[in-house]
Amino acid sequence: MTFWLVVSILALILSPFAWLKPTRNQSGKMAVRMEARRMGLGMQLTPQEWPHWLPNEPPIQCAQYHRPRRAGRDDTWCYWQTTPGVWMNQWREPCTDTGLLTELIKLPANVYKIEAGPQMLALYWGERGDTAVLQDIAAVMKALA
C-alpha cells in the first residue's frame, strides 16, 4: 500500500513535465521553421483578416514567410488561393500575369495568400508538409523576389 501511494504521488508531481514536451506536430513545425531560416526566409505568426469570399477560412493566426525583394522592384500585388491553383486578387479577378501565374501554380494547396510590396515578399502558409514542400515555396519566393 505504501509503495502505490509513493508511486502515485511521484506520478502526480512529475506529470506536468509531460506537458512541456512538444507534440509531434509542433516538433515538425519547428523543424520546418528552422529549415526556412537556413534558406534565408523569415517567419512570424501574424493575425490576418481574410476576405469573406474565401471558400475555406484560413486560421486567424497564420504563419507568414517573407523575404526581401531585389532593388528596383516597385510592383505591388496580392493574390489569394481560392482552390488549388486558382489565384484571385481582392476583387475576385483571376491572375492574368502569365509569368506570375506559372510560379504561383507551383505553390502547395495550403498556401492561402501571397503579396508583394516594393521591399518585401510575403507568403501565408498553413505549414502542412515537410522540407520538400518548403523548398518548393523557397524556390517560388526566390523567383518572385
Image: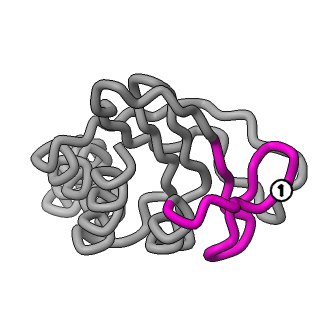
Residue 37 pos. (x, y %) = 17, 42
Task: Give the tally of numbered discs.
Answer: 1
Residue 140 occupies which quadrant of the picture?
bottom left
Q: Residue at x 28, y 71 (%)?
A: 130
Residue 68 occupies which quadrant of the picture?
top left
Q: Nearer the viewer, residue 65 or 75?
A: 75
Q: Residue at x 49, y 71 (%)?
A: 102
Q: Is residue 17 above or below residue 118?
A: below
Q: Residue at x 39, y 50 (%)?
A: 144
Q: Secondary structure at mark 1?
A: loop
What residue would you read off at disc 1? 93
Magenta region includes residue 118: no
Mark 1 is surrounded, within 10 Å at the Cα level, by few (under 14), some (14 to 19) or many (20 or more) other residues, namely few
Q: Residue at x 80, y 43 (%)?
A: 90
Magenta region includes residue 93: yes
Q: Is residue 128 above or below residue 66?
A: below
Residue 131 pos. (x, y %) = 23, 68
Q: Is residue 114 left or right of residue 93?
A: left
Quarter the N terminus occupies: bottom left
Quarter the C terminus occupies: top left
Q: Is residue 116 left or right of residue 11?
A: right
Q: Kindly identify the amino acid type of the residue bearing the numbered disc 1.
A: Glu
Q: Which residues are magenta?
A: 78-99
Residue 136 pos. (x, y %) = 31, 68
Residue 91 pos. (x, y %) = 87, 46
